[in-house]
Image: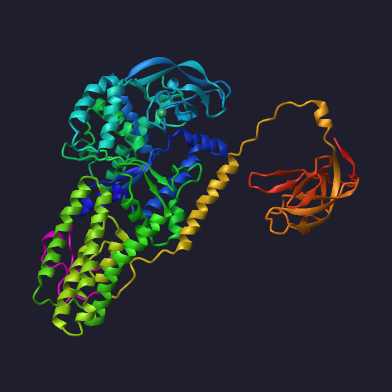
Amino acid sequence: MPADIYARYLRMQGHDVVFICGSDEHGVPITIKAKKEGVSPQDIVDKYHAIIKKSFEEFGITFDNYSRTSAKIHHETASEFFKTLYDNGKFLEEVTEQLYDKEANQFLADRFVIGTCPKCGNEESYGDQCENCGTSHNATDLINPKSAITGATPSLKQTKHWFLPLDQYEDFLKEWILKGHKKDWKTNVYGQCKSWIDDGLRPRAVTRDLDWGIPVPVEGGEGKVLYVWFDAPIGYISATKEWAEREGKDWELYWKDESTKLVHFIGKDNIVFHCIIFPSMLKAEGSYILPDNVPANEFLNLEGNKLSTSKNWAVWLPEYLLDFPDQQDVLRYALTANAPETKDNDFTWKDFQARNNNELVAIFGNFINRVVVLTNKYYDGIVPAHTDLSKRDEETLAALRAYPAVISSSIERYRFREASQELMNLARLGNKYLADEEPWKVIKEDEARTKTIMFVALQIASSLATLSEPFLPFTSNKLKNILNVSSSDSTKENSVENTWNDVAIKEILIPSGHQIGKAELLFSKIEDEAIQKQLDKLQASKKANEIANAVVEPQKETIGWDDFEKLDMRVGTIIEAEKMPKAKKLLVLKVDTGIDVRTIVSGIAESFTAEEVVGKKVTVLVNLVPRALRGVESEGMILMTETPEGQLVFVNPEGAKADNGLKIS
Ligand SMILES: [Zn+2]
């Protein structure tokens, strides 16, 4: 989201922008998934790349190129990059001992190995990075490592690898980040970088013993590939090349010209790769520019829990687009207004609903709807001419002209939530102006004044059409069509066209005499049922996870034969059953035990009705001391088991010869 807002904003300012992203397709989890599903890793990445690319497009993310790291151009680019560093002696070549899984017959690196983080003690740390404390380390640093493939404890085996000696880049990183970017980088990003650099950096292996990835292109590299975090950031370069080839541009301008500004939009778990490792790689290569800024966000949680795709604790974009058709801007707005820019934040469906109903509908939508409806009603949709402007009118128009600079300032400092709130404040200004000036009352006594009010309100509506574009692009287009001004999806030529800066300087944004279109709802209220449906979906995920993770209870302590022989269990049949009055769980049963017919009170009423259990063969513990339940004496116990879903199941001695009274032993 922040990257798309930023790119759209820069384009509106007339900057030459190339907005790049892509699927990182060489991760170890891909190979694990492929193995599980019995397909090739390429099958997996082909499937997901298509889904992800389409979802981004439908969500209005304006990538100039959404590429992928399995593309030929990327393999060539990353391979060349490695070769250049190799030829210039930038790597250390070392035979080291790496973790090896004898059962799986392969080396374990990165996500193939799980163990205890040496820094924070998290027992589920991956081989290359701990997701709990964000530390990046080598797999051999893990305490008590286990193979993610077989669960075996790995042994050490010698293998040759190439290392990027990060320790040799400490001075450069200190100068560039700690001195150079103290003021302009976000404190969360700067702080993480400082802590790594202060801890001291160590050489990092940039190759792996794997068969999925980009082959190491030098002598001795057989059977090895580039480390995924070595090749992935080079993907930004390959994606730019791919785009430049398509567009007939020179890619090098965007990566090697000092006047180019490179900005990485990422999450905090990627800070080390974008601020320490990739810049050191670029520095080692020597001909590239370095990132100007890396405005990483903290984590966005979902309903109080960490997002997890494997646990299905997520809002899937393709599903959102189906459940909330044509409401991309609502999610865009909720995500921006609630972005975890300075600390971890929580996405909740209630907040999503409130942002829509209380802000987009009640303020933005309400204002626009009133302006358009009244203009059509009073003036057949023609912008009226104003007469003398009141002090309030002048102040309102002056306030409007201040907004482009205010919002720009927030965007340029990467404060997108602040920027989105300023946009909403502009809508508030319009909504309040109309509510205070009440043109629907004034029209009864002063037609000239009404025209002036509507003229001012139309200027605000027009400014919203322009300034909302980076945040709410679908709404912006819709509003431009309603106001009959140029929009990015209209083919008509129109004299009324405002740039971002026009809003600050033009006296008139939409002139009198201009014909606007009919009213159309920009946003609609989201009802509780729609929100409940989403919450139910998450609840179902939670339940499924509990079942999947249900553990078998450990065995109880050993008992003697005589202890067991004390239990007298018999085959019985339930011959009567009725619900215990005022007790949710209890059925009162009459059971033929072969010895007698007795009463047993059983807590099974939530799983079975009385009718269902009559005639059922059951296992009865007959010599249990009687106990009164709600005043009914219960003589024995019927044996049951319970599934993780909470469904009770009879331990059932079904069979032709299993007559009542037979002993169970
Ligand atoms: Zn840790």
Name the quadrant containing residue 104.
top right
Where is residue 409 shown, x and y percent of the image? Answer: 18, 49
Quadrant of ligand 1 in image:
top left
287 w.r.t. 647: above or below? above
325 w.r.t. 661: above or below? below
Q: Is residue 273 magenta?
A: no
Where is residue 646 shown, x and y percent of the image? Answer: 65, 47
Residue 532 vs residue 514, the one in the foreground: 532
390 w.r.t. 228: above or below? below
Where is residue 30 shown, x and y percent of the image? Answer: 48, 37
> Which image quadrant: the C terminus?
top right
Residue 510 vs residue 632, the one in the foreground: 632
Residue 139 vs residue 431, the one in the foreground: 431
User: For the point 30% across and 22% down, which residue is it?
Assistant: 199
| Badge count | 0
User: For the point 44% across and 64% down, which residue is it?
Assistant: 527
Which residues are the magenta region? 490-516
Q: Is residue 496 magenta?
A: yes
Left or right of 466 in this view: 595: right
Furthest residue to the front? 631
Any part of residue 286 in sight: yes
Residue 569 vs residue 102, the one in the foreground: 569
Magenta stretch, main secondary structure class: loop
Where is residue 649 shown, x and y percent of the image? Answer: 73, 47
Any part of residue 502 in sight: no
User: For the point 25% across and 77% down, which residue is it?
Assistant: 374
Furthest residue to the left? 388
Q: Identify the image's colour scheme: rainbow, by chain, secondary structure or one colour.
A: rainbow
Left or right of 582 in this view: 413: left
